[in-house]
Image: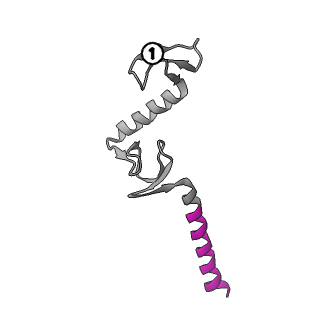
Amino acid sequence: MITITCPVCGTKVVWDDFQPSDFRCPKCRENLNLHRSLKDNLERREMETTGRKYHCPHCYGLVSSRWFTKCPHCGYWLFGKFNFHGKWYFIVSVIIAYLVFSAYFLIYIR
């Protein structure tokens, strides 16, 4: 049996093995998901064990680290004070790879 707290009204709901993983809060009828609640619980415990709390500079949500990680709330990649959306990460990586291969070609092959 697992106790899940509703994020909207704060009601504690007890889930047992005979219930489905998707169910509703008995008070406010909010959709609750067992797997999402367990994932949130693990993320919260991970941040409590490190002792430090970091906030995303874009959405100010809690993240485990501010370097080379993706914010679970807004989906932006975090690199210290800098952040950008996932599409830009791929584009910047391709540009850097192109510049490295171009420099290698000009220096060693030509």
Residue extending furthest toward the top: 18
Element type at mark 1:
strand
Residue 76 in the image: above or below residue 18: below
Q: Pinpoint residue 9: horizontal percent, then vertical percent.
A: 39, 21
Residue 48 in the image: above or below residue 67: above
Foreground residue among 20 and 84: 84
Color encoding of the figure:
one colour
Indicate whether residue 102 is drawn in magenta.
Answer: yes
Q: Amino acid at mark 1?
A: Val
Q: Residue at x 35, y 36 (%)?
A: 48
Q: Few, some or many C-alpha atoms within 10 Å of disc 1 (few <14, some 14-19, many ≥20)?
A: some
Residue extending furthest toward the left: 51
Residue 57 in the image: above or below residue 96: above
Indicate whether residue 105 is drawn in magenta.
Answer: yes
- Residue 89 lies left or right of residue 10; in this view the side is right
Q: Pinpoint residue 62: horizontal percent, then vertical percent.
A: 39, 42
Foreground residue among 90 and 16: 90
User: In terms of secondary structure, what is the magenta stretch mainly?
Assistant: helix
Q: Pinpoint residue 28: horizontal percent, then vertical percent.
A: 45, 17
Residue tagged 1? 13
Q: Pinpoint residue 5: horizontal percent, then vertical percent.
A: 42, 21
Q: Which residues are magenta?
A: 91-110
Numbered label tally: 1
Q: Residue at x 38, y 21 (%)?
A: 10
- Residue 31 lies left or right of residue 6; in this view the side is right
Foreground residue among 20 and 109: 20
Q: Quadrant of the C terminus?
A: bottom right
Residue 71 in the image: above or below residue 19: below
